[in-house]
Image (spheres, rainbow, N blue to C red):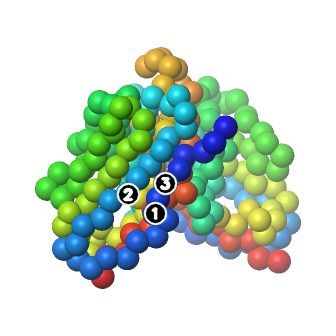
Amino acid sequence: EAGVAQSPRYKIIEKRQSVAFWCNPISGHATLYWYQQILGQGPKLLIQFQNNGVVDDSQLPKDRFSAERLKGVDSTLKIQPAKLEDSAVYLCASSSQRGTGYAGANVLTFGAGSRLTVL
Amino acid sequence: EDKVVQSPLSLVVHEGDTVTLNCSYEVTNFRSLLWYKQEKKAPTFLFMLTSSGIEKKSGRLSSILDKKELFSILNITATQTGDSAIYLCASGNTPLVFGKGTRLSVIA
């Protein structure tokens, strides 16, 4: 089974510039997550999609971050304009959600991440 | 607000030592507790625990959950340099809430 693909792996931009990250989840996984991991911290959820609908975006800074999942497969996360504090690794993950009572739906498979440095 | 707290935050041991990593949680809708290993790439899944007192084992790694006291431990016996990584604990419902991780360094 192919894993979760992310690109680019690394990106360096100046503050106020924009950046976009792409994620392709495991085939057949209905649920896709974007997490932000700042150095020394655990991953923090930014947004969760179920197919192409948003389930939870309560922690997404919507004034500068946006995300979409067209056709319920690939997803793109955009930051515009970037701030210094956005420097982090952006992790995409997917899971096979088989219903709210299924504990295994919590088993996320992560991509390698996209490391963003904002100067 | 759901909370997952890991301790210690960092640990340095010698090869062959046994280590215990701790994870306590306060979540409103507990479904499972998960452990991940994160090297310089994607976090990889280690264990999922849903029932109290049941030990999950994989080689030198094992984990147990105490749902009454709301904590879990991850044990690694006979540590090797390849065990050096950040170990993440996560709990809750969907989505998962992660702790800050324990950075384990195993020196030869």
Which residue, given by chain and number where applicable, does mark 1 sit on?
A8
Where residue A100 appears, as percent x and y from the top left, is 43, 19
Q: Please state which amino acid type lies under the numbered disc 1.
A: Pro
What SS does tag 3 mark? strand
Q: Please state which amino acid type lies under the numbered disc 3.
A: Gln
Q: Are marks 1 and 3 on the same chain?
A: yes
Q: Please state which amino acid type lies under the numbered disc 2.
A: Phe
Q: Residue at x 53, y 65 (%)?
A: B9
Q: Nearer the viewer, residue B28 or B44?
A: B44
Q: How many marks?
A: 3
Q: Are marks 1 and 2 on the same chain?
A: yes
Regarding residue A40, the answer to whether it shows in the image is no
Which residue, given by chain and number where applicable, does mark 3 sit on?
A6
Determine contact: label 2, label 3, CB under 8 Å: yes
Determine contact: label 1, label 3, CB under 8 Å: no
The disc, 1 or 2, on the residue closer to the chain's N-terminal end is 1
Q: Distance of mark 1 from mark 3, alpha carbons?
A: 6 Å
Answer with the quarter of the image where residue B93 lies.
Answer: top left
Regarding residue B103, the answer to whether it shows in the image is yes
- Residue A21: give its label: 2
Q: Residue at x 28, y 56 (%)?
A: A78
Image quadrant where one finds the C terminus of chain A = bottom left
Image quadrant where one finds the N terminus of chain A = top right
On screen, residue B76 versus residue B29, left or right, reads right
What SS does tag 1 mark? loop
Q: Nearer the viewer, residue A18 or A45?
A: A18
